[in-house]
Amino acid sequence: MKTSNLPNSEGGMTIDSSFNWHDICGVAEVDDKRSFSSKFGKRPVSLRPGGTLLTERALRVCSLHAGSRVLDIGCGTGETVDLLERAGVLRPVGLDPTGALLEEAHARLASTQLVRGRAEALPFKDLLFDALFCECVLSILEDGMGALRGYARVLRQGGFLILSDVFTRNGQALGRPGHGSQLLPTKAPLVKEGLLGLLEGLGFTLLLWEEHERLLKEFAARMILAGLRLPDSWCFGQGWKTRKGDGAGLSYFLLVALKGRARASSPPR
């Protein structure tokens, strides 16, 4: 059953608990193997708040040198790796567990290496990548802590970790505790303080934290108007309504972190 295309009277969005966010983000097998292109057109689809706007913002912060090897976790049909490939100076690699999505990405991309695999068990050797993108994926993993450890393992010293995802502003985890940590919920919006603490423990230095609530709301409205549904885990309190003054509710963040200690010339937060 489709949800309403209209926000409710208190400013919240209608949520359908039967929605499977894994299918939308491309982190699980697509059962019917239907082409995403039939619904979204021939270009790589943008199924995250901000699309490549935040990807481009992160690239400006990182200032990657020519020949940098960049991994995109949950690459889906290839929107981010397409952007990286068109830059002409980077060596992108896309990882996704869904064969149907990788097939679509392969048809669009000229030279990007595409690998079938899971974010929690990266099939790469240590210290291989100069940057790693994980956009709208971490919050839907069963073992987010295991994924973060893997990201730290495959990144070179001085490499960049770029995360963007949904988080809750009030510091309260909305999902089940993650594997090995009470600070990283499973299949739920992330908690800022917990995430930053875990990254620090893994040897990362925060370079940038930005919050983009407007992009999240625009994305939600666009999904609903397209006849798609929002994940049940995004429902917090009265949906999208934020109580003035207490910082409650959901938002979307962009994070850039450096593996190791930041140099004096590193970009400010």
Image (cartoon, rainbow, N blue to C red):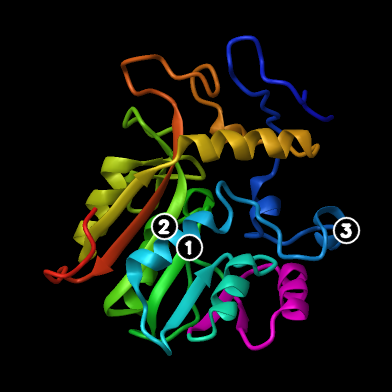
Residue 175 seen: no
Mark 2 Cα within 10 Å, few/some/many (few <14, many 20+)? Answer: many
Image coordinates for residue 249, horizontal then vertical, percent: 44, 26
> Which amino acid lies under the numbered mark 2 shown in the image of this protein?
Leu
Mark 3 Cα within 10 Å, few/some/many (few <14, many 20+)? Answer: few
Residue at label 3?
38
The N terminus: image quadrant: top right
Residue nearest the observer in this picture, 8 or 117 = 8
Camera-side mark, 1 or 3: 1
Residue 236 seen: yes
* Relative horizontal placement of residue 125, taking residue 27 as reference (left or right): left
The numbered disc on residue 163 is 2
- Inspect the magenta stretch and tell me whether residue 185 lies in it: no
For image coordinates 63% across by 35% down, the residue present is 220
Question: Residues at badges 1 and 3 in contact (C-beta under 8 Å)?
Answer: no
The image shows residue 2, relative to residue 253, as above or below, that is: above
Q: Which residues are magenta?
A: 90-116
> Which amino acid lies under the numbered mark 3 shown in the image of this protein?
Ser
Distance from the alpha carbon under mark 3 to that under mark 2? 29 Å
For image coordinates 74% across by 77% down, the residue present is 108
The numbered disc on residue 56 is 1
> Which amino acid lies under the numbered mark 1 shown in the image of this protein?
Glu
Image coordinates for residue 223, horizontal then vertical, percent: 71, 39
For image coordinates 46% across by 83% down, the residue present is 124
Return the disc, 3 or 2, that comes first in the chain's sequence.
3
